[in-house]
Image: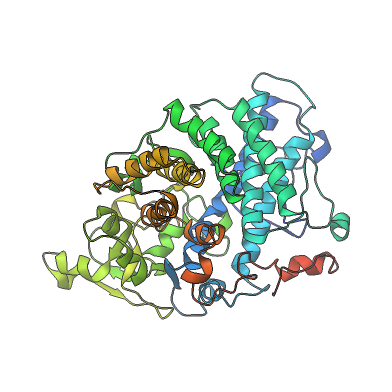
């Protein structure tokens, strides 16, 4: 997805900051149009939509925080002050001053702002194909709001209009239930107006809208509605599990039958550490590899987001997903014809001996000579295996053990693992375990533990009544004139 300067400096958060990236495409002539005199042609809507898609680049943070906040990974890195916010989240001692959490807040609100800008002028002109553009816009707004309420709980809800800086002090946080109502409305519209297949690479389709809608219902324990959304996807037959699990994590096999919703990245444009949201490449992969690595297959990395021994041991040794998902660096080294040809440096931010092998730099996937942050690996936000496991969970919660087992065992069969049986709570817990194994390293684990009530038992230092959500960034509260209350116990 290309970055487009859509005639305005998009406001980050609620008018609190501005993205200042150097690689925006120029709109010619500069400053010839203002915000009120835009949307005069279909092309204007298309360019604005590209701008709304662009904030999906921030999804790499979900891979990090969703794993590091859980029992799946530690923060890692060069030292405990290297991206210190991730270490605070890892230790569950994060507070309202945390760069990574502020980025989640402001980058997702930037996405909301870009979507709202389109919606504000939804009716300015009519043209063929506008309904689909609006459907994509509403999907994106729903996704950004889902990220925000998933992280922060009650959040300011602004719909179909831009927000002036002078209004910030008058905006209250909206209850999570109301935010979910808006998300559901957007996703239902998107599902009704999107096709099952879109020839434009990276554009969302009906299946993505239904999958996210089902997930939103699942997060609210609305299991009947969740099952109905997932069953539409499964019955339609547009998606299928890829036969070789390993291929899912290679750039050459992307956009496959298992892709329901992913974020497109490119290895053809460089970038720098000063503006990770400006990147066209997937920053997570560049950060995940071994530090100062020398040897075959992998590229040099920064040793972030390191899988734990607990995650590694959760796998059956015969489960091929373990070694596909997790790189055991010493076992890999010992397996080489000349182990002495492999070397790396342990990061001072912690070392487990394991690396995230799903999102990692590989030498045959490197981008430009400035390849550190240009990984082309897409972020698989929702894949069909996830849909099957969510459908299994929703059906198990409803007592529909037959469909739940069918969906669960489809995922296990693809991995070459034996089918399971069971019912009731035993079946539900088996589905939750399977989610951990199948989706390891993908950013789901923390939120799964929270929504299923398991977090306090599985995450060290997790405080019930506090850590289910993250704190609202203090700078955002300050900019409202302290109009917002902080989340409980922060």
Q: Position of residue 337 (x, y in %)?
A: 11, 64
Question: Residue 348 at what x, y percent from top left?
Answer: 41, 81
Give the image location of residue 446, x and y in percent.
51, 62
- Image quarter (top left, top right, bottom left or bottom right) of the C terminus: bottom right
Q: Position of residue 61 (x, y in %)?
A: 53, 59
Res 9 visible: no
Q: Residue at x 72, y 42 (%)?
A: 182
In the image, is residue 468 above or below residue 417?
below
Along the viewing direction, whichever of 163 and 153 lies nearer the viewer: 153
Asked whether, in this view, residue 345 is left or right of residue 164, the answer is left
Which residue appears at 31% of the width and 73% of the height?
A: 353
Residue located 68% across and 59% down the image? 153
| Image quarter of residue 215 | top right
Compared with residue 217, is residue 338 higher up or lower down, i.e. above or below? below
Q: Residue furthest top?
A: 128
Res. 212 visible in picture: yes
Q: Nearer the viewer, residue 85 or 411?
A: 411
Point 64% across, 33% down: residue: 188
Furthest-left residue in view? Answer: 337
Left of 383 or right of it: where is 330? left
Q: Quadrant of residue 410?
A: top left
In the rendered picture of this protein, how many numbered marks are placed on residues?
A: 0
Apparent side of residue 406 relative to residue 81 in the rendered image (left or right) = left
Depth check, front residue: 217 or 485: 217
Q: How is the image coloured?
A: rainbow
Q: Is residue 324 left or right of residue 460?
A: left
Residue 29 higher or lower than 274, as above or below: above
């Amino acid at each position: 997805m290309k970055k487009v300067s859509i005639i305005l400096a998009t406001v980050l958060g609620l008018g609190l900051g501005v993205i200042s990236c150097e690689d925006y495409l120029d709109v010619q002539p500069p400053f010839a149009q203002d915000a009120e005199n835009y949307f005069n042609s279909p092309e204007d809507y298309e360019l604005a939509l590209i701008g709304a898609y662009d904030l999906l680049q921030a999804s790499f943070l979900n891979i990090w925080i969703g794993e590091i906040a859980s029992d799946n990974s530690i923060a890692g890195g060069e030292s405990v002050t290297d991206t210190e916010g991730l270490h605070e989240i890892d230790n569950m001692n994060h507070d309202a001053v945390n760069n990574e959490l502020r980025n989640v807040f402001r980058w997702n609100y930037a996405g909301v702002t870009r979507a709202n800008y389109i919606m504000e002028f939804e009716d300015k002109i009519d043209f063929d194909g506008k309904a689909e553009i609006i459907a994509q816009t509403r999907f994106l707004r729903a996704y950004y709001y889902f990220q925000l309420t998933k992280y922060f709980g009650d959040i300011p809800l602004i719909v179909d209009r831009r927000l002036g800086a002078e209004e910030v002090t008058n905006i209250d946080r909206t209850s999570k239930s109301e935010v979910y109502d808006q998300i559901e409305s957007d996703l239902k519209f998107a599902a009704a107006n999107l096709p099952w297949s879109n020839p434009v690479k990276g554009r969302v389709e009906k299946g993505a809208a239904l999958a996210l809608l089902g997930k939103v219902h699942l997060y609210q324990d609305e299991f009947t509605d969740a099952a109905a959304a997932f069953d539409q996807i499964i019955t339609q037959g547009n998606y299928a599990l890829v036969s070789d699990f390993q291929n899912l994590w290679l750039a050459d096999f992307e956009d496959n039958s298992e892709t329901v919703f992913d974020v497109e990245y490119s290895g053809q444009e460089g970038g720098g550490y000063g503006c990770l949201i400006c990147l066209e490449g997937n920053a997570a992969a560049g950060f995940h590899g071994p530090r100062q690595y020398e040897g075959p297959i992998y590229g040099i990395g920064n040793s972030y987001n390191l899988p734990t021994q607990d995650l590694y041991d959760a796998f059956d040794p015969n489960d091929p997903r373990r070694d596909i998902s997790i790189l055991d660096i010493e076992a890999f080294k010992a397996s080489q014809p000349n182990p002495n040809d492999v070397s790396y440096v342990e990061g001072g931010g912690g070392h487990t001996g394991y690396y995230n092998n799903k999102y990692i730099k590989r030498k045959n996937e490197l981008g430009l000579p400035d390849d550190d942050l240009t990984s082309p690996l897409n972020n698989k936000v929702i894949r069909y295996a996830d849909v099957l496991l969510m459908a299994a969970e929703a059906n198990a919660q409803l007592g529909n053990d037959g469909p739940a087992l069918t969906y669960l065992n489809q995922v296990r069969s693809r991995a070459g693992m034996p089918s399971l049986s069971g019912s009731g709570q035993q079946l539900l817990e088996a589905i939750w375990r399977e989610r951990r194994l199948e989706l390891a390293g993908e950013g789901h684990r923390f939120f799964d533990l929270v929504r299923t009530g398991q977090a306090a038992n599985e995450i060290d230092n997790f405080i019930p009544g506090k850590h289910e959500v993250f704190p609202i960034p203090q700078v955002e509260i300050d900019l409202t004139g302290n109009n917002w209350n902080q989340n409980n116990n922060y």
